[in-house]
Image (cartoon, rainbow, N blue to C red):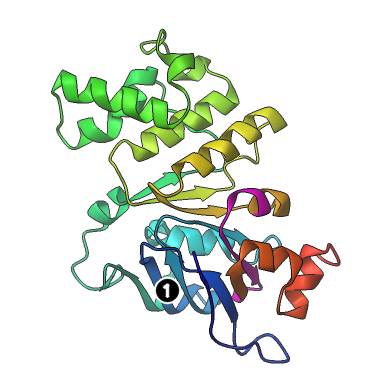
Amino acid sequence: MSDTTTLAQSPDDTAKTSYHYKTGNQGVALDIKDFNLWYGETQALFDTTFPIQKGLVTALIGPSGCGKSTLLRSLNRMNDLVDGLRISGKIEVDGFDIYGKGVDVIALRKRMGMVFQKPNPFAMSIYDNVTYPLRVDGVTKKSILDDTVERCLRSAALWDEAKDRLHDSALGMSGGQQQRLCIARGIASDPEVLLMDEPCSALDPIATAKIENLISQLAGTYTIVIVTHSMTQAARVSHNTGFMYLGRLIEYGATETIFTNPKVPRTNDYVTGRFG
């Protein structure tokens, strides 16, 4: 992996964003270009521009209300469900704008697995949770479903704990197991990108450590974008980190640089705990 530096930050840290991120070796998964978003008359994101690298873990940090989750949900167009939504700019995947005319939003979301803040397993068996995305697509062949369950539960580090209870209710699992099950369900349709919105905020430290270890194992196979309030978590699991403040991306860089030698004073103030 290499680092690259582009735009320099202006003195008031609002006109430009500082970039010095890791590029990896797989290219760009998502290219965000001058992206703005409004909820009605309220603008939530301002001129957001940065690339998300394939196969790497990108963390979005910043104080509450800074636009992290709004940006994350823009990547698979979940914000389309909000009344009064308006956007400008582009988010490109493989060179096409996901907000362009004629885009199949359902197909787009299949390429973007989503894991939410609180575990949300369906009220059905462990087996049926994992296979749900395939069944929606009309896959019924038992051998394919069986192989998918084992593959995804192994990928989610859950196979050994669940293999003897596949037909038990997922609601009987612990919170940490449920979240790993949701990750297994999220990768069942073989997405390119895995979006995680504070996936550990409802978990205890032991379960959190398991999820973080899982994120590290999945990196490379998937591009992962994680929103987190925990700066230590971002430092542990991500390759690149974007610091957001008041709807703007202030700095985007290699994680170790963001936390040890940020280029922008406001970033330094946040990661050293002077505000937040």
Q: Quadrant of residue 266?
A: bottom right
**Residue bounds of the magenta highlight:** 235-250
Q: Quadrant of residue 263?
A: bottom right
The residue shown at (22%, 24%) is 145
The residue shown at (50%, 64%) is 71
Vertical side of 232 occupied by 270: above or below = below
Q: Secondary structure at mark 1?
A: strand
In the picture as drawn, the residue positioned furthest to the front comes out as 1
In the picture as drawn, the residue positioned furthest to the right comes out as 274
The residue shown at (27%, 27%) is 148
* Spot occupied by residue 250 in the image (x, y as percentages of width and height): 64, 77
Q: Is residue 83 visible?
A: no
Q: Is residue 18 left or right of residue 152?
A: right
Q: Is residue 7 visible?
A: yes
Give the quarter of the figure containing the C terminus.
bottom right
* Spot occupied by residue 89 in the image (x, y as percentages of width and height): 39, 80
> What residue is disc 1 on?
32
**The disc labelled 1 sits on which kind of residue?**
Ile
* Spot occupied by residue 98 in the image (x, y as percentages of width and height): 30, 67
Q: Is residue 242 magenta?
A: yes
Q: Is residue 245 left or right of residue 25?
A: right
